[in-house]
Amino acid sequence: MRVVITGGPSSEPIDEVRILTNTSTGELAVTLYDRFMDAGHDVDLLLGEGARHGRDGARHFDRNETLARMLAGIAKAHRVDLVLHAAALADFSVTPVDAAGTPMVAAKIPSRVEGVRLLLVPKPKIISDLRKLFGSAYLVGWKLEHDGDRAALIETARQQLRANRLNACVVNGRAYGPGLGFCTEAGLVHDAPDKAAFADFMVSFAAGGFRTYQ
């Protein structure tokens, strides 16, 4: 089985020396990679450059666009069976503007400048292209939320998988509570207490041909 795993954060440049990123560590992606490798599968691990966890076999991306090119290359070269899209990607591109709203173009915005603001513009979602890229592969997305409750998060996950033609969506964060949940169109179908247990579940689920929770 060929498995593609994405993990860690992407980033967006503010200028040539500053970036906007997030706190994703890549730990879950690396845990999944280890388990699938131990089970004898072919695994492509794509990690954000800011990930604090890594493996020698990983390839690294900085921006969403870099990851998109990597995924397209893998899809062209291989028949992929499973995609675990756990990366925490940038939702917005960044344009620094001054107090008057004029874009600021500089290799390094001077720290003495007052009133710098960041204009955030929504970016296209890579998750929307996964089905087109990987055809019949089993596609798993991720949804982390800190606000709200578990029921609302599960419904959001179901909406995500419908909108992007995914097979499943993993939910976590304070809105979910401890552990991780595995959701399909039917709703929450598996609860894992921690990342290691979730990785073990995914390997077992894949070995069974993804048949348990269709």
Image: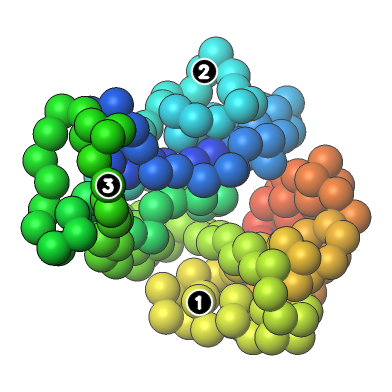
**Could you say which quadrant of the image residue 151 lies in?**
bottom right
Q: Mark 2 points at which residue?
A: 57
> Measuring 84% from the left and 66% from the top, which residue is drawn there?
177
Spatial separation of the CA atoms under disc 1 and disc 2:
30 Å
**Could you say which quadrant of the image residue 1 lies in?**
top right
Camera-side mark, 1 or 2:
1
* Horizontal side of residue 129 vs 148, given as left or right: left
Which image quarter holds the C terminus? bottom right
Camera-side mark, 2 or 3:
3
Please tell me whether residue 126 is drawn above or below residue 17 in the rendered image: below
* Residue 97 placement (x, y as % from top left): 19, 54
* Residue 9 placement (x, y as % from top left): 49, 41
Please tell me whether residue 106 is drawn above or below residue 146 in the rendered image: above
Inspect the image, locate mark 2, and give the three-letter code of the amino acid beneath it: Gly
Q: Do the residues labelled 2 and 3 touch (CB within 8 Å)?
A: no
The structure's colour scheme is: rainbow
User: Mark 3 Cα within 10 Å, few/some/many (few <14, many 20+)?
Assistant: few
The one of 183 and 15 positioned closer to us in this rendering = 15
Q: Residue 100 carries which label?
A: none
User: Mark 1 Cα within 10 Å, few/some/many (few <14, many 20+)?
Assistant: many
* Horizontal side of residue 192 vs 53, given as left or right: right
Q: Name the residue under label 3.
A: 114
Please tell me whether residue 148 is drawn above or below residue 8 in the rendered image: below
Which callout, 3 or 1, points at the residue further toward the start of the chain?
3
Which callout, 1 or 2, points at the residue further toward the start of the chain?
2
Q: Name the residue under label 1.
A: 160
Inspect the image, locate mark 3, and give the three-letter code of the amino acid beneath it: Glu
* Horizontal side of residue 195 vs 211, given as left or right: right
SS assignment at label 3: loop
SS assignment at label 1: helix
